[in-house]
Amino acid sequence: YGLTSGTLHDAEAVILAVKPQDLDKCVEEFKVELSGRVLLVSLLAGVKSSRISEAIGREIRIIRTMPNTPILLLEGMSAIAKGENASDNDLAWVERVLSQSGKTVILEETQLDAVTAVSGSGPAYFFGFVEAMIKAAIRLGLSEQDSKLLVNQTLIGAAKMIEESGKDAGTLRKEVTSPNGTTAAALASFESSGWEETVYEAMKAAKDRSEELSN
């Protein structure tokens, strides 16, 4: 982005968007350039605001956020939490910025590990399910091209129905499912494999890993 050493001296806000394991190395490079009035907005998964202050070596205003990759298409989901020394005005400013790229929710910092497991990592879950459906469609005799079209558009259409129908996912599922029909047969197979518990265990693993990163 063309930034060079010294350009952060007059910054009112700095967005910290690196891998959690790169925190110390990154902060070491620029911490002396931060003014005492700067607001630091952290996108680091699992890294507590107290840990960031420790790396910088002094108290600093910090807002933690957990966006997800659909923010690139202005369809992001960003959770925002007030960290160390930040004010309500800081929180409101960050919320206004991120709301330009999708939906936002303001939570407590202690809830961000769960957010990471839900919306932060969530897109990958749906991408993985789409991959599995495409592979299954091919095994059922469809071409790869047709399988991708059918599965991708089904996901997009289903998402639109959740967004625009005003109905919750459970209601929409029931409306598609005729008694003893094809959808019922598929859902029964999912349920027999314990898919709700599988989803929970997977998301719990993500939350646990986020907590490990914070420690």
Image (cartoon, rainbow, N blue to C red):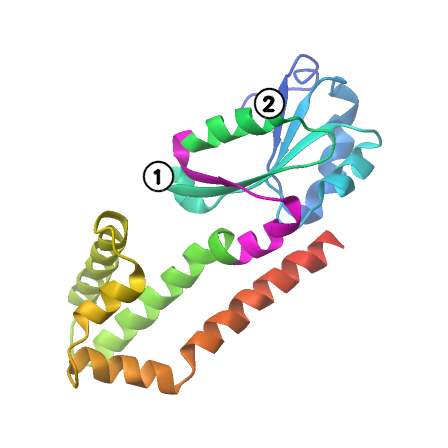
Q: Look at the image and give the residue range highlighted in magenta.
A: 100-117
> Dot 1: within a 10 Å radius of its alpha carbon, few (fewer than 14), some, or many (20 or more) residues?
few
Magenta part, dominant SS: helix
Question: Disc 2 designates what residue?
Answer: 89
Depth check: give the residue in front, 117 or 5: 117
Classify mark 1: helix, strand or loop. helix
The answer to which image quadrant residue 53 occupies is top right
Classify 146 as above or below 3.
below
Q: Indicate left or right for 122 with 55 as reference.
A: left
Q: Secondary structure at mark 2?
A: helix
Residue 68 % position (x, y): 47, 46
Q: Amino acid at mark 1?
A: Leu
x and y percent of residue 101 in the render? 40, 34
* Residue 76 drawn at (x, y percent): 41, 42
Q: Residue at x 64, y 19 (%)?
A: 4
Q: Residues within 10 Å of mark 2 (few under 14, many from 20)?
A: few
60 sits to left or right of 39: right
Q: How many marks?
A: 2
Q: CA distance from mark 1 to mark 2?
A: 27 Å
Q: Which residue is denoted by mark 1 in the rendering? A: 73
Q: Nearer the viewer, mark 1 or mark 2?
A: 2
Quarter of the image where one finds residue 71:
top left
- Residue drawn at x 35%, y 39% is 73
Asked whether 103 falls inside the magenta stretch, the response is: yes
Which of these two is toward me, 50 or 179? 179
Can you give x and y, in whole percent of width and height, for residue 45 in the image? 61, 48
